[in-house]
Amino acid sequence: MRIVVTGGAGFLGSHLCDALINRGDSVICVDNLSTGRRENIEHLMSHDEFEFIMADVSEEIPVTVPVDAVAHLASPASPPDYHRMPLETLAVGSRGTEQGLALAQRSGARFVLASTSEVYGDPQVHPQTEDYWGHVNPIGPRSIYDEAKRFAEALTSAHRRTSQANTGIVRIFNTYGPRMRPHDGRVVTSFISQALNGDPLTIYGDGSQTRSFCYVDDLIRGIVAMIDSTDPGPVNLGNPHERTVGELAELVLQLTKADSTIEYHPLPVDDPARRRPLITRAQQVLGWEPVVSDEDGLRRTVQYFQGRPEEVEAAREAIAGGQLDGAVVPAQGTAGVVQAA
Ligand code: NAD
Ligand code: UDP
C-alpha cells in the first residue's frame, strides 16, 4: 500500500513510518517540522519506498499520486507545544484534517484520524468509554487542542456520512517512548530528564491526578490495525493500567536510581483529574491490546535518554521548575482555577 503519514517526523508519526516501511508499504511523510525532527526519520531518507515532503498540511498536502491510506497525525500534542502554537493547533485540527480528508477522497483511500483522550476533557465518567461525550471547557486554555480534535472528529464523521468515505478515528491516550524530546514538557520526558540531571521532579498539583501510559510500540500496532480496518471508530487506544502522577515519579526515581527530590508546583488550569481508557472496542474490533509493562517501557525510554546526555542536559533550563512556556496557565475570568499544591 502507499500510505501518507502527516506528522510523520514526530514522535508517534516516525514510529508509524518505521512500522509501515518494515512491513513493505510505501510511505509519504508530510511534516512541517514544527515539533517533529528530521533526525527521527533520517534513517528512512535513503529508503526507496520512503519520501519526505516538508509542508504545512493546514495549507496544502502536496501529494498528487494515488494513495491507499492517509494517517493524519500532524498536530502539536504536548501541552506546552499547543499553548505556544494555539492558532496553528486549531488550524491543523480543522484545515489540516480537511486537507487530509480531501486527499483520501481523491483516491478513495482510507483516512485515519489520530484523535485523543482529550476529547473527554476532565471526564465525569471513569474509565472512559467511546460513547462518553466528554466534559470540555470550550474557552479554557486546553480548548485549543481539545476542541480542534473534537472538530476533527466531527469533520471526519460528516465526510463518512455524506460521501461514504472510508474513515476511522482512534482516540489515543498518553503514549511515551524513544524519540520524545527531553524538553517537550510532557510528564514522562520531564521526570526522566529531571532524574537523569539530578534535578527535582516537578509534580503539578499534589500528584493524585491519574493517567494511563501506553508504550509507543503497542500504540503503533493499534494504529496500523486501524489503517487496515474499515471500522469507523472511534476506538480508544491506550493502556488501561492507571497510576497517579506521584506514583509515576516514584517509578522513574526507582528505575533511574536517582536521588532527586520532588517539588510541587501549581496544577495547570483544567488539568484532567483522572484518565483511563476502556479498551473493549479495540480488543473486539482490532484484536488489539497493549503488552508492554510500564516498567519495561520506561526502562527503554530511560535508555534512549541516557544515550543523549547533551540533549537531556540542554532540556534542564526549559523544564526547570515547571517553567516551560505555557505549562502552567494562570486562571482567567471564570475559565478555571489554579489550585495550589
Ligand atoms: P509530536 O509533536 O511529536 O508530532 C506531531 C508532528 O506533527 C510533528 O512532527 C510536527 O512537526 C507535525 N506537525 C504539526 N503541525 C503540522 C502542520 N501544520 N503541518 C505539517 N506537520 C505538522 O506529537 P506526537 O506525540 O507524535 O503526536 C502525534 C499525534 O498523535 C498528534 O495528532 C496528537 O494529537 C496525537 N496524540 C498523541 C498522544 C501522545 O501521548 N503522544 C496522545 C493523544 C493523541
Ligand atoms: N505533569 C507534572 N509534571 C510535569 C509535567 C506534567 O506533574 O513536569 C502532570 C500534568 O499536570 C498532568 C500529567 O502530569 O496532570 C500528564 O501531563 P502531560 O503533559 O504529560 O499530558 P496530559 O496532561 O496531556 O495528559
Image (tube, grey):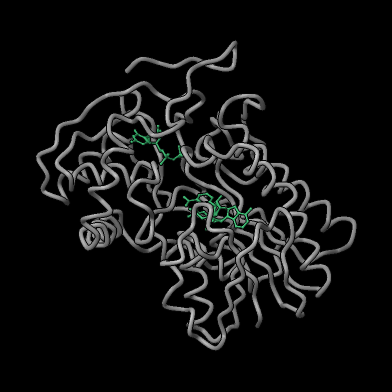
Residue at 38% of width from left, 43% of height from top? 242
- Residue extending farthest to the top is 333
Residue at 37% of width from left, 53% of height from top? 181
Q: Is residue 189 left or right of residue 230?
A: left
Q: Is residue 287 left or right of residue 210?
A: right
Residue 214 sits in which quadrant? bottom left
Residue 322, relative to residue 338: is it above or below? below
24 or 43: nearer the viewer: 43
Q: Quadrant of the N terminus?
A: bottom right
325 or 283: nearer the viewer: 325
Residue 225, relative to residue 159: is it above or below? below
* Number of on-image labels: 0
Residue 185 sits in which quadrant? top left
Q: Is residue 223 left or right of residue 87?
A: left
Relative image position of residue 223 (x, y in whole percent): 56, 65
Residue 268, relative to residue 235: is it above or below? above
Relative image position of residue 125 (x, y in whole percent): 56, 33
Residue at 32% of width from left, 37% of height from top? 319
Q: Quadrant of the C terminus?
A: top left
Residue at 35% of width from left, 41% of height from top? 187
Relative image position of residue 130 (x, y in whole percent): 62, 46
57 or 175: nearer the viewer: 57
Q: Is residue 27 left or right of residue 183?
A: right
Relative image position of residue 314 (x, y in whole percent): 27, 47
